[in-house]
Image (spheres, helix red, strand yellow):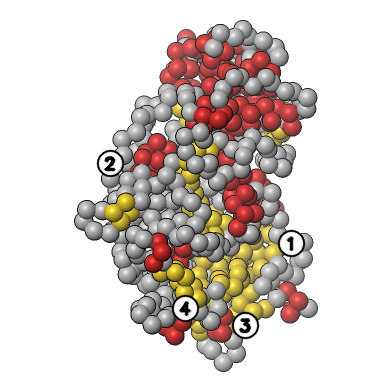
Amino acid sequence: MRRLPGIAVAAALAALTPQAVGDRTPEAGPTARRSDAPESRQAVFARVARTYGVPESVLLAVAYLESRWDANNGLPSVSAGYGPMHLVDGRLGPELRRHDTEDPRGDERRPRPPVVPAAQAPPPEDTLHRAAELTGITPARLRRDPAANIEGGAALLADHQRRIGAQPAADPARWYGAVARYPGTTGTGAGIGAADSFADEVYATIRTGAARVTDDGERVVLRAIPDLSPPRLPTSAGLRRAAAPAPDCPPALSCEWMPAAYRRLKQGGYGNHDRYDAPRPIDYIVIHDGETGYDAMTRLSADPTYLSWHYTLRSSDGHIAQHLRGSDIGWHAGNWYVNSRSIGLEHEGYLARGAWYTESMYRSSARLVAYLARKYQIPLDRAHIIGHDNVPGTTPETVRDMHSDPGPYWDWRHYFELLGSPLTGSSDPTARSVLIRPDYARNRARFTGCAKSGTCPSRSTSSVWLHSRPSEEAPLVRDVGKHPTDASTYSVYDQAARASTGQRYALAGRRGDWTAIWYLGQKAWFHDPAAIRTSVPATGRLVTPRSGLTSVKVYGRAYPDASAYPRGVPPEKLTPLQYTLPAGQFYSLGMTSPATYLRAGAFDPSHHRIIRGDTPYRQIQFGHRIMFVRAADVRVISDEDRR
């Protein structure tokens, strides 16, 4: 793989107490230290590398590609991996897919009730317990102690080197085969390609180097070795694509074609997507969290009674499966207008189980999105690269059940750095907008709903909570669509009263350490202290009701007026949502959206057509989700208008 630009050295975090290596118990393993003094993470990597004969650069680079050296409070990743080395507990196994009552197709003319068929998948390779066997360290300690976890990862690499018949060597170039085996995805066909791709990225990281401060305050540096060029093992990259059409991915990515099912159903209808045999306009890339494992997701995509999306990404190594052509319409976002104008990416993992994502998956996803954005001329901003949780409901009845993935633990700031489009904001102190941009590592917003106890572990998040007044004790702002009769909650699945990194809102006021934005027709306050800002000034166009209107209707899609439909085609009813945009309020303009409706519903795609209207819409950041207003109902204010 080629590296995306911009492995940046993170800003130094507040000093935290370093993790001690621990006591001298029998489980401490062969590299147990003889002192209770704290040991830096950098020193742990050096010591463990010497003990197991693994080059320090290799150990550091593998850990960087798995976790960016973070400890993640001993919590599992979305794919049950622990610690800096992402040791996977295969005994946890995949969970059942959590499914809300959202209609994934989002077309009330042909509703698709959500049904989750059984999808048996093999458990992942259990590297956690294998590391325990190799080191004598208990699985519990490998999960919670970063130093022990690094030792477990080094033992695995040394074991892989032995198993392929290679000798321990000081030269990092001679560890390519062991590195390729580390994610547990070796085998034949696509597995070989994924292993090679992971190893290529590890060695690219060694060549460029990396440095950052971890989530628990440890500074770690991987010094660059620019001339390192490992001999590639005689694996067969051609096997990845020889028996199937070439997937639409950047050439350097590990990517295979695994087609979604397109068949007639016995009970009528067809599944599990719509085909369109001409170029279709694509405005969005939708980021999903699959709420299950990679193997289960790829099996589900082959079930004609289920749903569909364009790509699935694997956590351990960033491998990608493509299921739909770019011209095909997936049933994934719960809004037919968005489905018909988007490409959907499902990422392995769970919104609330541990909920940290591997660097390998972030990087593969970012490379794929950057490639697709260039191909379809999609701007790299949060008005076009959206989460499933940013997709609006189609009617007042559907708003409440719209999905909430990828959730608050997806690191949007880092993701856009990998996209090559960092969320920088503006240096203009008089800017009328703010860009939500908390420091991910230090922003630990509280959530409930992650466990039976009702609380979520403290961890880094991309979201800020929005209050009705500038006080932590004030109630959260109301969302009449999500909660018609009750209050917003702090649930990890409830996005009613929070703003997310990269979203731009109109500034509505400041008071002390608090900033107000316009949000769902009201002022919403978030904690934004000068010492640790959670937003930055931003410029960009805003919309407000045109003169003479006291409020403006808000919509969940931009469909044409009835007059645009040809004879014989029944017009789609365009019902406003339960929200309104009041006079005197301002909302950020994402883009001007054409009024279109892609009419489908037949197995034969030759019957499908796009109906275009003359009424343009403005896409706005109205709440946590994007929404639409008629262009004729609002006036657009640019930054120049206030000068």
Q: Amino acid at mark 2?
A: Ala
The residue under the point 60% across, 58% down is 376
- Look at label 4 and name its amino acid: Pro
> Which label sits in the foreground, 2 or 4?
4
Q: Nearer the viewer, mark 1 or mark 2?
A: 2
Q: Residue at x 53, y 81 (%)?
A: 615
Q: Nearer the viewer, mark 3 or mark 1?
A: 3
> Looking at this view, is 604 or 636 the one in front?
604
Mark 1 is surrounded, within 10 Å at the Cα level, by few (under 14), some (14 to 19) or many (20 or more) other residues, namely some
Q: Which residue is mark 1?
A: 426
Residue at the spot of label 3? 635
- Whether residue 116 sits left or right of residue 436 in the image: it is left
Q: Describe the element under mark 1 as helix, strand or loop.
A: loop
Residue 83's spot in the image, x, y percent? Answer: 53, 29
Q: Is residue 27 visible?
A: no
Front one among 556 and 298: 298
